Amino acid sequence: MRKKKRQEKIVDFLEGRIHLEGEELKEEQESFAALKKILKREEDFHPPTDFWDSYLPNLRRRMEKGGNFGFVPALAGALSLLIIGFLLFHYQIFSPNLPSISGKYNGKGTLYGISSLTELEEFSTSLTQAYGLNDLLRKATDLMVGNLNWEGLGEEEKEGLFRALASQLSEEADIAADLLYGNLQIDELSSELTSKELKELENQLKGT
Amino acid sequence: MEELSDSELVDLFCQGQEKAFNLLVERYKERIYYLALRMVRNHQDALDLSQEAFLKAYKNLRSFKRKSTFYTWLYRIACNTCLNFIKREKFRSFLSFGDLRKPFSRPQDSPDFSYERDQLSQAIDKAISKLPPKQRVAFVLHHYEGLTHQEIAELLGKSEGTIKANYFQAIKKLQKILKDYA
């Protein structure tokens, strides 16, 4: 929370809403001014003037296309789901004991059963095995907990990779990524975990 | 009809005059296109996304509850369309291990609209494309679109503090990536 508050304060300071003193802040101010200067030098892109002439006709075509074919893909999709569902059930590809992604998260910031990276790793492994996902989840988790170190991969790329995967797979992994990269502070979670448990989780996440 | 307000055009559309929607598109196509362009840094994708936003608006306009202005509603649709696209693209680039060093896949612009961009513009494109979705949205909406942190927070349903923290992290990363151009 303190870190987030500090970041908020610095933004307010950089944008001139509050006044603060300090050598470190002076450097922040200089770097911010330099960045603004760089961004200001960027060339603006403008599409050719005749570009807008075809915009509405193209959009109309897309609208008509969407209207004409709406029912067919819906029906095809429903039939495919029925067939896939029957095949999965028939060949017992899914069983009731498999881990559930949505069951781990109640949508209100509460993490059920996952309170550390080790548990997240175990959860990911079981998902990988159970659902026959390819190696991606495994690799992302390995990357996150430090078992894997792709040479030349920067921190930002790691974050991007993990986030991409987390956002596809589970809310709790996304929350973990937010915590890990400081977008979310642990006390923002309206969690059922005790403050001590939350602190431990935060320390574990930061420790990786 | 051109002098009618957005609200009146929405009324006409709901009464069955579909042409009223064309006027709404004419009115906002540029703003929505440029919003998408700032977000995805690619002309062709910006074109598709801006049209996708209008398509969604077209399909849902009859159920528009008018708790906000038409433009605010459309703007929110466009922001979410872009955000979803960015998330999808990040995932796609993750699947393609050959592109690991390019965190955001950038399809080629259509030859008709290819444009020479200077090195700095390309570096800025690349730097912004490297930002995680939340940071990118916070940065683009504040820096390029001129929205306040409070407005962005309301638009995305987050707290103002979270948006400021996302913006802070975005500028830190951009400073680091673009330091050679200072």
Image: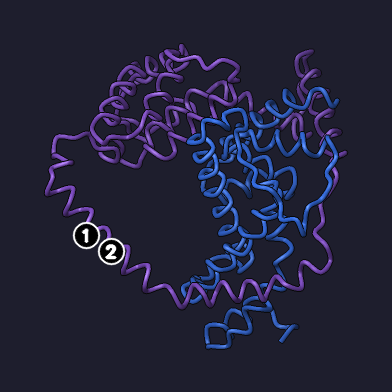
The reply to whether callout 1 and callout 2 are in contact (CB within 8 Å) is: yes
Residue B80's spot in the image, x, y percent?
54, 53
Badge 2: chain ID: A
According to the rendering, which colour does chain A have? Answer: purple
Tell me the amino acid under the disc marked 2.
Ala
- How is the structure coloured here? by chain
- Residue B147 seen from this side: no
According to the rendering, which colour does chain B have? Answer: blue
Q: Which mark is residue B129?
A: none
Mark 1 sits on what residue?
Answer: A82
Tell me the amino acid under the disc marked 1.
Leu
Instruction: Tell whether A152 sits left or right of A65.
Output: right
| In the rendered image, the vertical position of residue A148 relative to residue B87, given as above or below | above
Badge 1: chain ID: A
The residue lying at 76 percent from left, 19 percent from top is A25
Mark 2 sits on what residue?
Answer: A78
Q: Secondary structure at mark 2?
A: helix
Residue A110's spot in the image, x, y percent?
33, 34
The residue lying at 40 percent from left, 14 percent from top is A204
